[in-house]
């Protein structure tokens, strides 16, 4: 998730960025549902949250993985100018964010959003 935030070519913005930052903030907070210092159970809520977060952020995670694969394929071709590569990546990035929005909207309409609409 940190790579998603730091990737200069991905440039996650707006509600997508906020969603990822909210998740990371939860894990950075030591005084969460079950304090981490409680032996045997302190990380139980964190483990449960990892599973829930992966489900909730699946559209963002899938889009980023697809973008990275596309970027790697474009880099392997090597025949594109820097400007042409940048334009292709920007086009792909926009398509991936549109796909993410469509998946999230569809899931919210079906009542499957974990944390509700954003």
Image: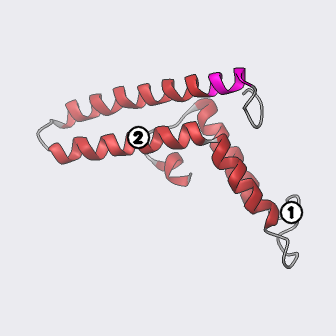
User: Is 10 above or below relative to 88?
Assistant: below
Splitting the image into 4 quarters, where does residue 33 fall?
A: bottom right
- Counting other residues with Cα less than 10 Å from the Cα at mark 2, is it few (<14), some (14-19), or many (20 or more)? some
Q: Position of residue 21 (x, y in %)?
A: 66, 45
Q: Is residue 48 visible?
A: yes
Which residue in the protein does label 2 denote? 66
- Counting other residues with Cα less than 10 Å from the Cα at mark 1, is it few (<14), some (14-19), or many (20 or more)? few
Q: CA distance from mark 2 to mark 1?
A: 35 Å
Region in magenta:
104-110
Residue at (71%, 45%) from the top-left corner? 22
Task: Give SS at disc 2.
Answer: helix
Residue at (39%, 39%) from the top-left corner? 67
Q: Position of residue 107 (x, y in %)?
A: 66, 27
Q: Is residue 75 left or right of residue 105?
A: left
Which residue in the protein does label 1 denote? 31
Q: Is residue 105 magenta?
A: yes
- From the image, give the main secondary structure of the stretch colored magenta: helix
Residue at (73%, 32%) from the top-left corner? 113
Q: Is residue 11 magenta?
A: no
């Amino acid at each position: 998730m940190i790579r998603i935030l730091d990737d200069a070519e991905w440039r996650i913005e707006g509600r997508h960025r906020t969603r990822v930052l909210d998740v990371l903030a939860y894990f950075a907070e030591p005084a969460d549902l079950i304090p981490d210092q409680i032996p045997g159970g302190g990380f139980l809520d964190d483990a449960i949250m990892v599973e829930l977060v992966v489900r909730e952020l699946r559209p963002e995670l899938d889009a980023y993985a697809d973008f990275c694969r596309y970027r790697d394929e474009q880099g392997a071709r090597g025949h594109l100018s820097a400007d042409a590569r940048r334009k292709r990546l920007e086009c792909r990035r926009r398509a991936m964010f549109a796909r993410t929005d469509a998946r999230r909207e569809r899931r919210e309409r079906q009542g499957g959003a974990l944390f509700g609409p954003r």
